[in-house]
Image (cartoon, rainbow, N blue to C red):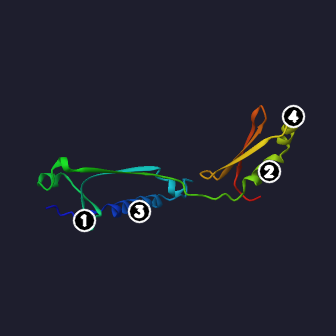
Amino acid sequence: MPVNEGAVFQAFLESAGRSLRDAQTALGVDRTGITTELAISDAELDVKVAVESDPRGALRIRPMGTRDVQAGAVQPEALSTVKVKYVAVAGEKTPRRSPSEVIGEIARREDVQRLERILGSFEYSARFVPERDIWLVSARAPNVGVVREVVLPDRER
């Protein structure tokens, strides 16, 4: 009988996730400029396990090694591979300014107003890019397309 009792699968996943978070936090952000959540962009964990359920029906996994197979505790063909892939996703970030504020700032610029007098009124769109904390503002003229794209930092004016 193997000594390792294993773990409830959900608890294993939660524990592995905490370990990855702790590793990312240990990397810090001081000189890198990378947010802690994105310091490790992706990671994989492969574990050979025996899969079983406990008396309550919860899925349990028990890591198995070569020693377990040699001891006859499990047949090699009965092992499963649990592959866990972690992918970094930036947290939700709320912009400080609204789309109408950044569009207004661009529409008031002298170079944009000059182009608008020549090409006709523009249709504006603004997209917040949370990973870089910036706004991308586009100005489109009818029958011409994009005539100006401006990147603005997301800070209070």
Question: Residue at left 77%, top 31%?
Answer: 144
Task: Please provide percent x and percent y for residue 86.
Answer: 42, 52
The reply, left or right, for residue 49 in relation to residue 108 is left
User: Whole-Å distance between the Cαs marked 4 and 1?
Assistant: 75 Å
In the rendered view of the protein, which quadrant contains the N terminus? bottom left
The numbered dot on residue 18 is 3
User: Whole-Å distance between the Cαs marked 1 and 3?
Assistant: 24 Å
Question: Are the residues at dot 4 and dot 1 in contact (C-beta closer than 8 Å)?
Answer: no
Question: Are the residues at dot 1 and dot 3 in contact (C-beta closer than 8 Å)?
Answer: no
Task: Nearest to the eye among marks 4 and 1: give it.
Answer: 1
Q: Which of marks 4 and 1 is nearer the N terminus?
A: 1
Q: What type is the residue that disc 1 sits on?
A: Asp
The residue that disc 2 covers is 105
The residue that disc 1 covers is 54
Task: Nearest to the eye among marks 2 and 4: give it.
Answer: 4
Q: Please tell me how crowded label 4 is: few (under 14), some (14-19), or many (20+) other residues with Cα within 10 Å.
A: few
Q: What type is the residue that disc 4 sits on?
A: Ile
Q: Please tell me how crowded label 1 is: few (under 14), some (14-19), or many (20+) other residues with Cα within 10 Å.
A: few
User: What secondary structure is marked by label 2?
Assistant: helix
User: Whole-Å distance between the Cαs marked 1 and 2?
Assistant: 62 Å
The residue that disc 4 covers is 118
Question: Residue at left 76%, top 44%?
Answer: 124
The reply, left or right, for residue 104 in relation to residue 72 is right
Question: Residue at left 16%, top 61%?
Answer: 2
Q: Which of marks 1 and 3 is nearer the N terminus?
A: 3
